[in-house]
Amino acid sequence: MLTTIKTAYTDTRAADLAWALGREPLPALAVLDLQLEEATVQLRLLGASHQVLLTEEHGSCSETVACMPGSSTPLPLGVAKRIGDWEYEFAAHVETLSRGSFAGRAQELLALVAEHPYGLAGTFPGAPHAFTAMLAQRESGQVRWRTWHAYPQEGRLVATRTRVGVRAVAAL
């Protein structure tokens, strides 16, 4: 699903993004509710930021990547945590692209997400290459999502990848 976000583009630097687990739902500009087998996933666009809410029989999880005033947790390159019965893994990567490469990559990602049944992307009025895009899936008993946060004025694209699954029990 592709939508135009009806607000000014305000998150203007990739370096301002922060990461948090366990935050309450924040006001969203666009939402996509998904049922991925027994998992309920809500993809939430918060402007040039995102929040994913996951609920399953093993518990719930909230991931937020946003410009959060007062946050002391910058966007990490990687995180691995246990959340109850789950293993949570997060990775982030920042790409710096030329203006022409950026426009092409933006069009490619927006087309991918807009046509995917479990995808949500939002662009900003007057700034078609400023966007946030999210794509969720369930694979091998795990819920995974990818996100892209575009900052065309910097030529930067922040990509994240998350995996949440039930912790494997070691054989004795």
Image (cartoon, rainbow, N blue to C red):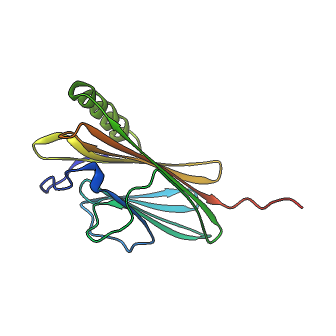
Residue 137 percent location from the top left of the image: 51, 48
Q: Is residue 88 above or below residue 135?
A: below
Which residue occupies 73% across, 59% down?
A: 168
Most extreme residue toward the bottom, as rendered?
24
Which residue is pictured at 49% across the width and 58% down the height? 35
| Residue 161 vertical placement versus 86 (above, below) | above
User: Between 159 and 125, which is closer to the camera in this rendering?
Assistant: 159
| Closer to the camera in the image, 56 or 85 | 85
Q: Is residue 123 left or right of residue 162?
A: left
- Which sits in the foreground, 134 or 88? 88
The percent coordinates of residue 114 (x first, y second) are 33, 40
Q: Quadrant of the C terminus?
A: bottom right
Residue 169: quarter of image: bottom right
Q: Residue furthest top?
A: 100
130 sits to left or right of 55: left
Q: How many marks?
A: 0
Q: What residue do we see at 46% from left, 50% from top?
A: 77
x 64%, y 53%: residue? 141
The residue furthest right is 172
Residue 66: x and y, percent?
A: 31, 60
Q: Position of residue 23 (x, y in %)?
A: 40, 72
